[in-house]
Amino acid sequence: MQGLPDQSTVNDTISVADAFVAARSLSAELAAPLSEEDCCVQSQACCSPVKWHLGHTTWFFERFILTDVLKLDPYDDRFEFLFNSYYNAIGSRQPRAQRGLLTRPGLGEIMAYRSVVDEHIERALRRGDLEQEHVGLVQLGLDHERQHQELLLTDVKHLFWCSPFNVEYLAEPLTAAAESDANWCRFDGGLHTHGVDFAGPGGGFDNEGPEHRVFLEPFELTDRLVTNGEFLGFVADGGYSTPGHWLDLAWTHVAERDIAHPLYWRPTESGWQEFTLRGWTDLDPAAPLVHVSMFEADAFAKWSGARLPTEFELEAAYDDADGRGALLEDRVFHPKPASPDRTGIAQLIGDAWEWTSSAYGPYPGYAPPGGAIGEYNGKFMCNQYVLRGASCVTPTAHVRKTYRNFYQPDVRWIFAGTRLARSV
């Protein structure tokens, strides 16, 4: 499942223009329920204010298309310092942990900036002013926009969780469902082809290629994600206080931070509750576990007598996926329980990103693109782990079999859960 047009259709600039308008409009729509104050605050160093997301994604299109390709003057010379994220080749920038100090420019000015840049990009696409490689850069920008749509909601959830009040992004309550037992699905070993042979603008991120072969031993995966109810068993059994379940670095991390349950859980007199984008709600035991670190996922797997899957095992299973879970366009913004009527492996697409045991590194033959764009993925191939699939806040057009998400193993604020694997 490819989220972007492949190289054979990259010249269809009208369809790219339509996709551009749709993606840019969706970002504004996601920000619409928020106040200007909501959009200015940064709740932790790894989060960003909503208005920074809106400005940064706009700067990406302006810097790499309007300025570099079409040679237009910048909208505001200051914005390169404010909205550059990590491109060292471009220059200095506002420190990531201090983005919340930027009360100005205001939200209105950033939206005006978006409008001007959008007008220029759409006009260039519809008039055919861009060469094929530059249309590919617009497509890369669309994938980048979709990443930040997910991050915007992820950061808003953390921000609202920090409030002493029960703050809601959506008012509608979640619907509980019946819990169903997990089943094991077997997959044959042998040589499997992974990755893409056209990675780069217009065909996927560069870290998704080149295409290569991987030998897999026979393995099994559970046919759904780990649920809250299953993880409650780990918590009740003293899983967080039993060092034998944990990697050494993980045990030190959990002990030093006094971590005893997933990020957005809290115990109450009447039972466990979970914070969602609808505010605090009773913990649904049938719903997929979410907002755990790789450390927690790995400890749970060991406690269960299983292990985490590798990224290649999940990719090999992708073609046998039974439907999909919740994605951003469903407007659920929370993982849904797996259907009890499933006939194959479920939730490989949507609901929650899946931690793997695979370290994030280059595929054989990988080389990052030249220039600042080459900083997008390659330089982060150190001390991180791969997640596969998609989450309930991932845009549908961002889903594909070869997508490699990656984070440090202690990260918990992202919509990440886990699935069990075992060798056979």
Image (tube, helix red, strand yellow):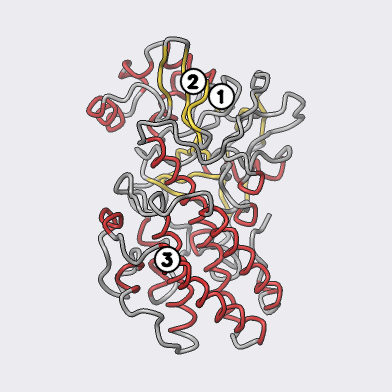
Q: Do the numbered discs 3 and 1 sit on residues whose CB atoms are within 8 Å?
A: no
Report the Cα–Cα distance between label 3 and label 1.
Answer: 37 Å
Q: Which amino acid does label 1 sit on?
A: Thr
Pick whichever, 423 or 247, lies toward us.
Answer: 247
Dot 1 corresponds to which residue? 227
Residue appearing at x 61%, y 83% in the figure: 123
Dot 3 corresponds to which residue? 55
Q: What element carries label 2?
A: helix
Pick whichever, 219 or 239, lies toward us.
Answer: 239
Q: Is residue 82 left or right of residue 55?
A: left
Quadrant, the C terminus: top right
Q: Which amino acid does label 3 sit on?
A: Gly
Of mark 2 and mark 3, the one earlier in the sequence is: 3
Query: How far across and down, in percent of the image, does residue 354 sit?
Result: 52, 38
Q: Do the numbered discs 1 and 2 sit on residues whose CB atoms are within 8 Å?
A: yes
Q: In this view, does 358 lie to the left or right of 411?
A: right
Pick whichever, 320 or 29, lies toward us.
Answer: 29
Q: Is mark 1 on a helix, strand or loop?
A: loop
